[in-house]
Image (cartoon, rainbow, N blue to C red):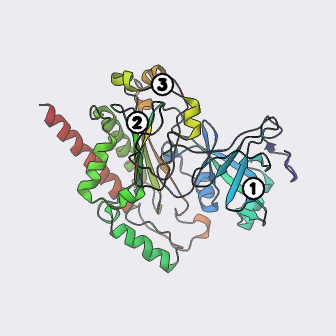
């Protein structure tokens, strides 16, 4: 399996360097694009030029709240009817992932080659200059992907909440039909009133040894009271409310709000906020279950179906009668053992994480020649952060009063 295109001096072929495997995610909880896993710490997301440029120009103070941008990867795939076949690029293996609603099937007839493109590569510069993201023919696809940090890779049982932020979800360049469609979604959900809505979530239920998953359709149906109930559900592990986690999340959200407030002219339309915490509680470590890497790779923990709510077994026995699935920007743990997860969870910066993602419709003054210029910070985004903090503080107050 050799890449047939010419190599630039500053490009690296993964075929020549020992190979790599692209696999579908198994912990995807929001969004509509199926992303791939390159290695335990790197996800591959289909390249959109606006998002690429945003990652390359993120303000320094925002970087602690965004995934690390690792570069661009070029993938050549063969298309087989309604399937896109992704083959292991290692010459010693014939494993193939066939992606169609998350299904993976073996196939030894298709080929794929991958190479990493340096940020200074002439190829990438030409790509940006021409405004091209993909080149397709009838039988093959040369696709470009962003390589981003897998922000959940250090968690053993990652509990992930995907929140669509802001009161507006369409970009300045959206056509009229799309504008009206997104405005209707906002008006019919908590986006308009709270500036935030649930786009998907998975939470580890220690009492059952399973993940509880919810999708974007669940989130769209929620009113303010339902939103509060969903957050309560997300931070409750079946035994207790994770109050320490909630406090840490509130602290991070308040810091993020101060940073967003300083970003004059920035608008984060249609972006999401990931809230992640370690589901393997040190006080309930006996209920964490045993790690099974084969089960993780096979998708037994998959929360990415298009159904409305799912329970996936996380203890190694597979899903039982299935409470239903979710959709979106999933992230997978790296398989550290539970004792390690417990030791890490004693560090304040290891137990929780908050990250902004999805910048395909973001804009700011002077960005890519955008004609629309906004003034001041993104008030819709800040409204969402304020209401999110308020609801979490209310949950803490109720929890504390119940203990008295």
Q: Residue under label 3, please give it.
A: 290
Image quarter in which the N terminus is found:
top right
Q: Few, some or many C-alpha atoms within 10 Å of disc 2 (few <14, some 14-19, many ≥20)?
A: many
Query: Which secondary structure, mark 1?
Result: helix
For residue 288, side relative to residue 94 (left or right): left
Q: Few, some or many C-alpha atoms within 10 Å of disc 3 (few <14, some 14-19, many ≥20)?
A: few
Give the CA separation, mark 1 to mark 3: 43 Å
Q: Earlier in the sequence, mark 2 or mark 1?
A: 1
Q: Is residue 263 above or below residue 315?
A: below
Between residue 307 and residue 249, name the one nearer to us. 307
The residue drawn where x is 37% and y is 67% is 186
Residue 193, percent from left and from top: 29, 64
Give the CA separation, mark 2 to mark 3: 12 Å
Tally the marks: 3
Q: Is residue 348 visible?
A: yes
Residue 272, percent from left and from top: 45, 54
Q: Residue under label 1, please give it.
A: 124
Q: Residue under label 2, please give it.
A: 210
């Amino acid at each position: 399996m050799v890449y047939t295109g010419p190599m630039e001096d500053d490009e690296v072929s993964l075929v020549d360097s020992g190979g790599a495997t692209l696999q579908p995610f198994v912990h995807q909880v929001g969004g509509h694009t199926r992303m791939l896993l390159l290695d335990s710490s790197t996800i591959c997301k289909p390249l959109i030029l606006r998002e690429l440029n945003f990652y390359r120009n993120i303000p320094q103070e925002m970087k602690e709240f965004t995934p690390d941008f690792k570069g661009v990867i070029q993938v050549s795939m063969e298309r087989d009817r309604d399937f896109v076949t992704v083959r292991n690029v290692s010459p010693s293996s014939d494993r193939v992932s066939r992606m169609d609603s998350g299904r993976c099937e073996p196939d030894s007839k298709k080929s794929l080659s991958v190479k990493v493109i340096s940020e200074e590569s002439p190829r990438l510069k030409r790509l940006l200059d021409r405004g091209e993201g993909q080149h397709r023919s009838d039988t093959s696809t040369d696709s470009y992907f962003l390589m981003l940090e897998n922000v959940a890779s250090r968690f053993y049982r990652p509990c992930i909440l995907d929140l669509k932020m802001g009161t507006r979800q369409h970009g300045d360049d959206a056509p009229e039909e799309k504008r009206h469609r997104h405005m209707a979604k906002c008006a019919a959900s908590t986006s308009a009133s709270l500036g935030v809505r649930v786009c998907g979530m998975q939470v580890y239920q220690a009492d059952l040894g399973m993940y509880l998953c919810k999708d974007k359709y669940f989130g769209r149906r929620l009113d303010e009271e339902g939103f509060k109930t969903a957050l309560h559900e997300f931070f409750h592990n079946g035994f207790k409310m994770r109050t320490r986690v909630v406090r840490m999340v509130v602290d991070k959200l308040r810091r993020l709000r101060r940073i967003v407030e300083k970003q004059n002219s920035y608008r984060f339309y249609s972006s999401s906020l990931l809230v992640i915490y370690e589901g393997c509680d040190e006080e309930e470590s006996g209920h964490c279950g045993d790690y099974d890497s084969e089960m993780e790779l096979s998708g037994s923990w998959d929360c990415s179906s298009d159904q409305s709510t799912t329970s996936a077994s996380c203890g190694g026995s597979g899903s039982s009668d299935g409470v239903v699935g979710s959709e979106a920007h999933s992230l997978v743990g790296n398989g550290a053992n539970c004792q390690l997860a417990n030791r890490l969870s004693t560090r304040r910066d290891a137990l929780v994480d908050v990250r902004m993602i999805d910048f395909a419709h973001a804009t700011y003054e002077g960005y890519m020649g955008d004609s629309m210029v906004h003034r001041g910070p993104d008030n819709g985004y800040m409204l969402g952060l304020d209401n999110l903090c308020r609801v979490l503080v209310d949950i803490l107050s109720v929890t504390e009063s119940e203990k008295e």
